[in-house]
Image (cartoon, rainbow, N blue to C red):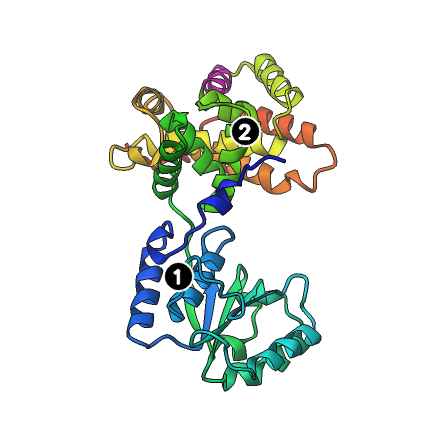
Amino acid sequence: MSDFIISARKYRPVNFDDVIGQKVITDTLKNSINNNKLAQALLFTGPRGVGKTSCARIVARELNNFEISDDNSYNIFELDAASNNGVEGIRNLIEQTRIPPQTGKYKVYIIDEVHMLSSGAFNAFLKTLEEPPSHCVFILATTEKHKIIPTILSRCQIYNFKRITTEHMVNHLKNICELEKIKFEDEALVLIANKSDGAMRDALQLFDKVVGVNKEITSDSVHENLNTINFETYIKIFEFINSKDIPNLLLITNQLLENGVAGDIFISGLSSFFRDLLVCKNKLSENLANYNKTRLDYLINSSKNINYNILIEYISILNDSELNFQRSINQRLLIELTMLKITSLEYNEEKKNLNLN
């Protein structure tokens, strides 16, 4: 059996300083604990994979002054509301709160995906949350705060976790590469970060997938393993659209789909490419396109030859196509129709007055 440990587990934060991209929250929690002003009911809300559960476990350790190696399992109780959302699970939890901790000062109850609790479970929990025992701290975690009843929200101190920025994720991945002695290209790590959509856990999973096959992380290896499209292919597609070369545009689209690129990934990627062209039309926003100098120069130069409003039209068409993709019966036809719409788009000078040049 291999001794391999997934990166998300191996590099899970063990203290507040280890948490990536949530400095405002970690500083607030740290100060609240140090000053003995932490509420007994906390709600951690935000996208998945951004550190909510990790922070909850860190809070539990810090409250009890436990070291990382300490066996504090008697003080931390975790309930996954996604699989235990009934009244019985909450009643069992409430029964446990009546017993003081055997070690340390507090018992900490972490309820993950709390929005999935049934209405009966919420009501059963309400009284305990309103008047918690002095030795108990409740940490609720959710990705969908709007589904939690107002009476629960009003009794919690709410911490809004944000998506992790590309910069924070890339820096963290670089640190891991250096620790693991893995060679990498900066742009390859940017691709992984962008693909993860702000979720550090997803970035680490993708990182493991690429590293599991290749000893070096390159842009090509990332595209190959994640079934994404490289920059040079987007350039070809862009040139076919610009020259209105419909046969070659349909051929390259077909080739990508035949090679295993998911249709929605194709549409989303092309939309992002046009978005990058859009931001490169203005000096102030060109750094929003995360590319190396060579590719950024290409985008800047190419953006000069295409109108701002045409790019907006392209992105709008692609966005509509992406929204319709999952419910489409013939997804390949939808993609081909999208390409035809973009290629046949005519620019009307009278209607286009907005210009950011």
Residue for point 38% across, 27% down: 187
Residue for point 40% across, 70% down: 64
Residue for point 36% across, 28% down: 186
User: Which quadrant: the N terminus?
Assistant: top right
Q: Which residue is mark 2?
A: 212
Q: Is residue 64 visible?
A: yes
Q: Which residue is mark 1?
A: 67
Q: Residues within 10 Å of mark 1 (few under 14, many from 20)?
A: few
Please tell me the numbered disc located at residue 252.
none
Residue for point 61% across, 13% down: 247
Q: Which badge, 1 or 2, is on the more N-terminal residue?
A: 1
Check disc 2 and report its element: helix, strand or loop.
Answer: loop
Task: Note whether 38 is above or below 174 in the view shown.
Answer: below
* The residue stretch that appears in magenta: 232-243
Left or right of 236? Residue 353 is left
Residue 43 is a magenta residue: no
Q: Quadrant of residue 59?
A: bottom left
Q: Position of residue 333 (x, y in %)?
A: 69, 28
Q: In front here: 222 or 317?
A: 222
Q: In front here: 246 or 19?
A: 19
Q: Is residue 356 visible?
A: no
Q: Position of residue 279 (x, y in %)?
A: 34, 34
Separation of marks 1 and 2 at Cα, in angstroms: 32 Å
Q: Residues within 10 Å of mark 2 (few under 14, many from 20)?
A: few
Residue 233 is a magenta residue: yes
Left or right of 98? Residue 163 is left
Check disc 1 and report its element: helix, strand or loop.
Answer: loop
